[in-house]
Image (cartoon, rainbow, N blue to C red):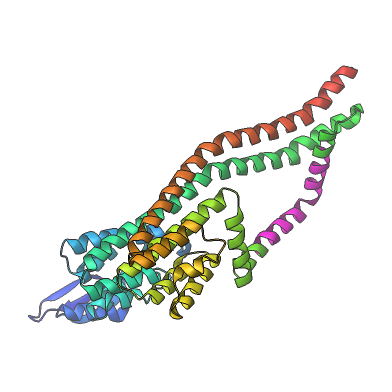
C-alpha cells in the first residue's frame, strides 16, 4: 500500500512524500528507521478507475518466475536482500504481489529469516521453494539457490505453458465447431424443415437425425443449459473431494497421449525435486514429504508417501517403487542403482532430464499431428451436415 506522510528531520526540517508498505504500522516503522518524526501518515487513496478487480490480481506462476529471476540477479549483484526485495516490490505490476513482497521485506528488515517470511505465504511459495531457501541460508550459498530456483520455476512454467499452448488450437476449433453447430440447429434447420414438410419429399436418416436434434435443442435448450451447467458444477465440486481428486488423477493418467505426457511430467517433477532437496542436504524423509506435497497428482503423492514410511522403517525407496504399476521399471532400476552407489541425487537429475526431453518430444509431435486430425474431423462434420441438407433438396429437384 502507498501512504502519504509528513515528518520532521532531526534538524527540524519538514519533509513530505509517499512510502510503500504492507500496513500502516509497517510504514510508520520504515519512516522511524529513517530517523524521521512522523506528524501525519495517511493511506493514499486511489481513484476508482485505478482500482483493479482482485481476480485479475491473483499471483500467477509467471509472477513467481519473474520474481525469482530478478531477485537472483539483484542478489548476485551484491545488493542487500531487503533493498532487493523493495526494488522488486516497486517494479512489479501485480498490486497483490507488490503488497506481499513489501511484507517480506519488512519481515527480513525486522530480523526474520527470509525462508520464515516466505513460509507466511504458502499459497504463493510452496514447501520446495521455502526449504531450498532455508538450505541456502544454512549453507551460506543463497545466491546459488536463488539462481537454481529461478531456473527451476522458469522451466516448470515453460513446460506447462507449452502443453497449454498445444491445446489452444484444438480447443478453439472444437469450440467454433460447437458454436456453428448450435447456430445451424437453432436458426437454419427449422427454416429448411418447413420446406421439406411442404414438399413431402422422402428424407434420409441423416436428415431425420438432424431435424430431431434441432427440434430437441429448440424446445429444450433451457434444460440442456441446466444439465450441462449442473454437470460441470458437479464435476468441479466432486473433483475437490479426496475421493474425486483420486478418480480425476487416475483418469488423467489413463487418457490416450495426454496421459503419457502427464505421467512423464509427474515423474520428471518427482525426480528433479527429490534430487535437488537431497543435494541441498535435506533429510531423505523430509525431502520425500516435500516432494509428495508438490508433485501435483494424488496417485504419485501416495506412492511417494509410502516410500517415506518405508525409508523410516529402514527400507529403500526402490523397494516401494517396484511394487507400483504406475512407476516404469526404468525409474525403479535407476533409483536402486543410485541408492547402492550413493549417487541418488545425480542419477535422479539425469532421470528428470530424460523425462523432460521426452515430454518436449511428445508435445512437439502432438502439435504436428493435431492439425491434420482436426481437419479430418472438421471435414467429416461438415460433410455430414451438408449431405443432410443437400440430399433432400436434390430429391426435391428430381420430383419437379
Quarter of the image with the C terminus in it: top right
Q: Does residue 100 show up?
A: no
- Residue at 66%, 43% (x, y): give it: 178
Q: Does residue 280 show up?
A: yes
**Farthest residue toward the front?**
340
Tell me residue 8's x, y (percent). 14, 79
User: Is residue 292 inside the magenta stretch?
Assistant: no
Left or right: 329 in relation to 105: right
Residue 170 quadrant: top right
Between 353 and 57, the one lying in front of the other is 353
Between 343 and 105, the one lying in front of the other is 343
- Residue at 59%, 40% (x, y): give it: 173
Tell me residue 50's x, y (percent). 39, 60
Quarter of the image with the N terminus in it: bottom left
Count of marks overlaid on the render: 0
Tell me residue 193's x, y (percent). 84, 34
Left or right: 78 in relation to 114: left
Query: In the figure, 13 relative to 62: above or below?
Result: below
Query: In the figure, 350 relative to 373: above or below?
Result: below
- Residue at 52%, 42% (x, y): give it: 366
Query: In the figure, 244 relative to 376: above or below?
Result: below
Residue 123 quadrant: bottom left
**What is the magenta range?**
211-233
Between 375 and 45, the one lying in front of the other is 375
Query: In the figure, 17 relative to 174: above or below?
Result: below
Residue 138 quadrant: bottom left
- Residue at 37%, 67% (x, y): give it: 340
User: Is residue 223 inside the magenta stretch?
Assistant: yes
Amino acid at each position: 500500500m502507498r501512504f502519504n506522510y509528513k515528518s520532521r528531520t532531526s534538524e527540524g526540517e519538514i519533509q513530505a512524500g509517499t512510502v510503500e508498505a504492507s500496513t500502516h504500522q509497517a510504514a510508520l516503522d520504515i519512516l522511524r528507521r529513517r530517523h524521521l518524526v512522523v506528524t501525519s501518515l495517511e493511506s493514499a487513496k486511489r481513484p476508482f478507475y485505478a482500482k483493479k478487480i482482485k481476480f485479475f490480481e491473483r499471483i500467477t506462476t509467471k509472477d513467481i518466475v519473474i520474481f525469482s529471476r530478478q531477485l537472483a540477479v539483484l542478489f548476485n549483484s551484491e545488493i542487500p536482500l531487503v533493498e532487493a526485495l523493495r526494488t522488486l516490490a516497486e517494479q512489479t505490476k501485480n498490486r497483490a504481489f507488490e503488497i506481499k513482497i513489501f511484507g517480506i521485506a519488512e519481515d527480513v528488515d525486522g530480523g526474520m529469516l527470509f525462508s520464515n517470511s516466505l513460509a507466511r505465504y504458502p499459497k504463493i511459495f510452496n514447501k520446495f521453494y521455502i526449504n531450498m531457501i532455508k538450505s541456502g541460508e544454512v549453507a551460506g550459498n543463497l545466491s546459488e539457490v536463488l539462481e537454481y530456483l529461478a531456473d527451476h520455476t522458469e522451466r516448470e512454467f515453460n513446460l506447462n505453458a507449452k502443453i497449454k499452448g498445444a491445446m489452444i488450437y484444438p480447443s478453439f476449433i472444437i469450440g467454433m465447431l460447437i458454436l456453428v453447430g448450435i447456430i445451424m440447429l437453432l436458426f437454419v434447420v427449422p427454416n429448411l424443415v418447413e420446406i421439406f414438410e411442404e414438399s413431402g419429399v422422402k428424407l434420409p436418416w441423416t436428415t431425420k437425425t438432424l431435424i430431431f436434434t434441432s427440434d430437441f435443442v429448440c424446445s429444450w435448450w433451457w434444460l440442456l443449459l441446466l444439465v450441462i451447467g449442473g454437470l460441470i458444477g458437479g464435476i468441479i465440486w466432486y473433483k475437490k473431494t479426496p475421493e474425486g481428486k483420486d478418480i480425476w488423477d487416475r483418469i488423467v493418467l489413463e487418457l490416450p497421449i495426454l496421459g503419457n505426457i502427464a505421467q512423464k511430467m509427474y515423474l520428471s517433477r518427482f525426480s528433479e525435486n527429490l534430487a535437488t532437496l537431497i543435494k541441498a542436504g535435506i533429510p531423505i524423509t523430509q525431502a520425500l514429504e516435500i516432494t509428495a506435497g508438490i508433485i501435483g497428482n494424488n496417485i504419485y503423492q501416495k506412492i511417494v508417501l509410502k516410500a517415506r514410511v518405508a525409508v523410516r522403517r529402514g527400507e529403500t525407496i526402490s523397494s516401494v517403487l517396484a511394487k507400483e504399476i504406475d512407476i516404469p521399471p526404468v525409474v525403479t532400476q535407476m533409483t536402486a542403482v543410485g541408492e547402492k552407489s550413493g549417487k541418488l541425487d545425480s542419477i535422479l537429475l539425469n532421470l528428470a532430464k530424460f523425462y523432460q526431453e521426452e515430454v518436449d518430444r511428445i508435445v512437439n509431435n502432438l502439435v504436428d499431428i493435431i492439425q491434420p486430425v482436426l481437419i479430418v474431423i472438421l471435414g467429416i462434420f461438415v460433410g455430414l451436415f451438408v449431405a443432410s441438407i443437400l440430399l433432400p433438396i436434390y430429391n426435391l429437384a428430381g420430383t419437379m
